Image: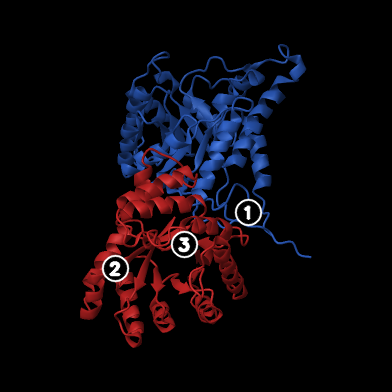
Chain colours: A blue, B red
Amino acid sequence: MAVTIAKERWTNNVAEVVLGTEPNIVKIGGESTLPFLHFEGEMPNRPAVALEVWDMEPTGWPDILTSAYAGVLNDPVAWAKKCVEYGADLVCLTLVSAHPDNKNTSPEECAQVAKAVADAVNVPLIILGCGVEEKDAQVLEKVAEALSGRNYLLGCATQENYKTITAACMVHGHNIIASSPLDINLEKQLNILITEMNLTANRIVIDPSVGALGYGIEYAYSIMERTRIGALTGDKMMAMPVICLLGQEVWKTKEAKSTTEEAPEWGNQERRAILWEVITAVAFAQAGGSLFVMRHPEALKQFRAHIDKMMQSNAY
Amino acid sequence: MILIGERINGMFKDIREAILNKDPEPIRYWAKRQYENCAAYLDINTGPTVEPKDQPAVMEWLVKVAQETVPLPCCIDSTNPEAIEAGLAVHKGKAMINSTSADQWKMDIYFPMAKKYNAAIIGLAMNEKGVPKSAADRVALAMEIVVNADAHGIPMEDLYIDPLMLPCNVAQDHGPEVLEAIRQIKTLADPPPRTTLGLSNSSQRCTNRHLINRTFLIMCMAVGLDSAIADVEDQELLDAVAAANILLNKDIYCDSFLKTFRQR
């Protein structure tokens, strides 16, 4: 007897966001079904992966991570090129030095660094501020201007600073990351506020805030799942692709940072830490993530091998 | 909640006069108003003053004027099969037929018509004996409608069962029966048929009509009502539906929920 495949009939799809300019563009989103259910609907774009670059030499990163970027950690341009060599679809430049507790770098200097990185690589950029809302508004305004027309992805915009960042993205032709603290109601509200300023929904990427494996991953997972179901059932203010800033979460866990000597019962650190990043990414791909910001090149490679398999057709 | 705007009906004086004078303006006005107030369908009814022989032509005209004004489908409302078919023939998009009852001869007319025009259809849980009193009798008639619709290949999401509410000042004991009927109708098939209700009927000749209508609508939503033919001018009704969508976990809450409900 033939088996009838149960298919859900969804009424809406996730918006497709295009990053970068021709010929170097990356498309994300556009799904008309839950992740990887190719038999039910369309998943026109693969999940894209960015590697992270800082504008200052990181402290506190374990050796197994810094060794992958030996010699380039104090040179964002060289570091970005290295990421492209490693196969990143995009480079995520984090302007950590702008933080008042770090170098308190001025918005103008940040914009110069961003420009130099943008000119050195042929992949689209994600540009993140330092996480201080007021400073990020100033920094991203200058960055948007310096990179006018390149159609990059800037963030993170929060309820406190979205107005300045949204305006800068509109004027200079960029896309915005709308960030909320693991709260689906605030997530929706921020998307509404941004679209009310007339930035179209297909220029917004949702950052729901994510945790690493073992550190609240299930909260982010369920919010992303609900976001996607909301999108597919017609809620246009939930129908944006999701970015997962997971590298920063994974590489602060003790499972990634403890050396083999410190935690021999957990096995080899390199294998363990990379797996931690891969498994975190895999979980979020299943939850509906479209854009992944990771740190270790080997984790990127393994995650992509997984995505290759998952993108194979399972149509009946 | 699929709201069907009730206002383009010859029972209202301005529409009756518009039909008599062939004046499209009142039709356009109410099409636009109801479109702006969240209607997903426009109910179109020639009213009883139009002669049966003229009803098809009037229905055709009303549907055309409404659809030239706003991008909404119509809920073609008549007891005259020829008037309904005339409306369907000129309709753009997926129409709704309003309505068949559980009488076999009516179902034999309207279900093939729904199939032919790929239209949704309202099935009234009544027959020539009238509106049943109990929930059980309403559900029994609903079952006959479900079975007949299925036999004609009408998908359940295109079938809207109306359990029929009577004015609460003359038939107060029907309220609990209607609520129970809605709950049971949603279990008749998998996927279940949809449900609808002529809401304003529940408050005919009562005071505080808007309050009665919206209270009953929310009670019905809680037990599975999918749609209602209603006065969408009533902003408090729309607010209550928006809040009920949140409380029933149908829409994701956000602070602007009253506003997002009104956005298409």
Tell me, yes or no, whether the two marked residues, 3 and 1, touch with CB atoms within 8 Å.
no
Q: Which residue is mark 2?
A: B69
At mark 3, the secondary structure is loop
Residue A262, percent from left and from top: 71, 11
Q: Using the numbered discs, state the Cα–Cα distance from disc 2 to disc 3 in whole angstroms.
A: 25 Å
Q: Which residue is mark 3?
A: B196
In front of the other: label 2 or label 1?
Answer: 2
Q: Is residue B62 above or below residue B164?
A: below
- What residue is rendered at 39% in x and 67% in y? B73
Q: Which residue is mark 1?
A: A38
Residue A219, percent from left and from top: 57, 32
Residue B92, percent from left and from top: 40, 73
| Disc 1 residue crowd, few under 14, some 14–19, many 20+, Cα 10 Å | many
Quadrant occupied by the C terminus of chain B: bottom left
Q: Tell me which chain the residue with mark 2 is part of.
A: B
Q: Looking at the image, which is closer to me, B121 or A61?
A: B121
Residue A119 visible? The answer is no
- What residue is rendered at 53% in x and 37% in y? A223
Which quadrant of the structure image shows residue A103? top left
**Label 2 sits on what residue type?**
Thr
In front of the other: label 2 or label 3?
Answer: 3
**Label 1 sits on what residue type?**
His
